[in-house]
Image (spheres, helix red, strand yellow):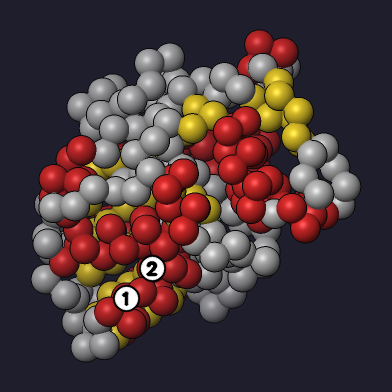
Amino acid sequence: MIPRVLWITGARGLIGSYLFGQAALLWPQCRVVAVGRPELDLTEHTRVRDQFLADSPSAVIHCAAISRSPICQADPALARRHNVDVTRHLAELAAGIPLVFFSTDLVFDGTQGHYTEDDSPNPRLIYAETKVEAEQIVRTHEQHLIIRTSLNYGHSDTGTRSFNEEMVTAWRQGRTLKLFTDEFRSPIAATETARAVLELLERNATGTVHVAGTERVSRWELGQLLAARHPEVQPRIEPSSLRDFTGPPRPADVSLKCSRAEQLLGRPLPRFRDWIAQAEPLR
Ligand SMILES: NC(=O)c1ccc[n+]([C@@H]2O[C@H](COP(=O)([O-])OP(=O)(O)OC[C@H]3O[C@@H](n4cnc5c(N)ncnc54)[C@H](OP(=O)(O)O)[C@@H]3O)[C@@H](O)[C@H]2O)c1
């Protein structure tokens, strides 16, 4: 069902901005409300409730989060306040209407790869722990849809939010990127994520659904694909291995299987390599 009023939290973030743009375009009959900073801090629960009652949304897509793992790792209490408490409050407010919650491939420990929705999460990072906690809360909501996605490619308002923007900026600054040949994700373009999620919402899908690229790609391969798209910044990459990494835990293979999404959508999700081959390069 197409909602009459759709709340999108984090609508100025990477994925939220694609959702906002596509919902406004595809669903002209729907009032799409961008909820978030700077107008409204979602941790201010009284103001959020007042705004919710005033807008009276008929569906909520909750994208807002502290999505940078290092920030969560450095301040777990801040991460829980934003990623867990805010989600709990929104789930309470959204009782009786569909609630779409964005989670991550990083809920898995990365020892297995090709994870399905039936595999058990085992988070290794604070960011992922907060997502697992939030998923558990959202699962008690009658009309929940939990979307687990992977690295999203796209263009953001700040030019700093996506992995591709980070890499191209580094190359522009003349830096050489060391990229793991043994760390795997399932990258997808944010425009494809947004399209799939809106279709799933329209089809009243519920439960947990993986929405990601249907190809397992290493950081190194991702760097090669991007480098080929951006010869103008003279990309420089060097292969490296997780075995030599000494920072916080990095799950090795959190690639996702997306057959449930494909079945619900009635179409395949793209392989990242195919998608990027036909896309206009982002500047
Ligand atoms: N992008 C990916 O590759 C990826 C992969 C897996 C999962 N996800 C998940 O998908 C969702 C969307 O990701 P994204 O990449 O679009 O994230 P993003 O670019 O970091 O955007 C998140 C947005 O939420 C806002 N926000 C955070 N806390 C807020 C608060 N207390 N009040 C109001 N707004 C707040 C942020 O505002 P500020 O900028 O002002 O902080 C930002 O606009 C997130 O839940 C993320 O964890 C993303």
Q: Is residue 19 above or below residue 233?
A: below
Q: Residue most toward the right? A: 174
Q: Residue most toward the top? A: 243
Find residue 59 and report its horizontal and vertical position in percent. 23, 69
Mark 1, Cα crowd under 10 Å, few <14 / some 14-19 / many 20+, is many
Find residue 219 and report its horizontal and vertical position in percent. 59, 32
Mark 2, Cα crowd under 10 Å, few <14 / some 14-19 / many 20+, is many
Q: Which residue is depicted at the point 54% across and 78% down?
A: 39
Taking the image as drawn, is residue 255 in sight?
Answer: yes
Q: Which residue is depicted at the point 59% across and 74% down?
A: 38
Task: Identify residue for label 1.
Answer: 23
Could you tell me how many numbered marks the image carries? 2
Quadrant into which the C terminus falls: bottom right
Residue 19 circle label: 2
Q: Which residue is depicted at the point 43% across and 37% down?
A: 186
The one of 252 and 80 positioned closer to us in this rendering: 252
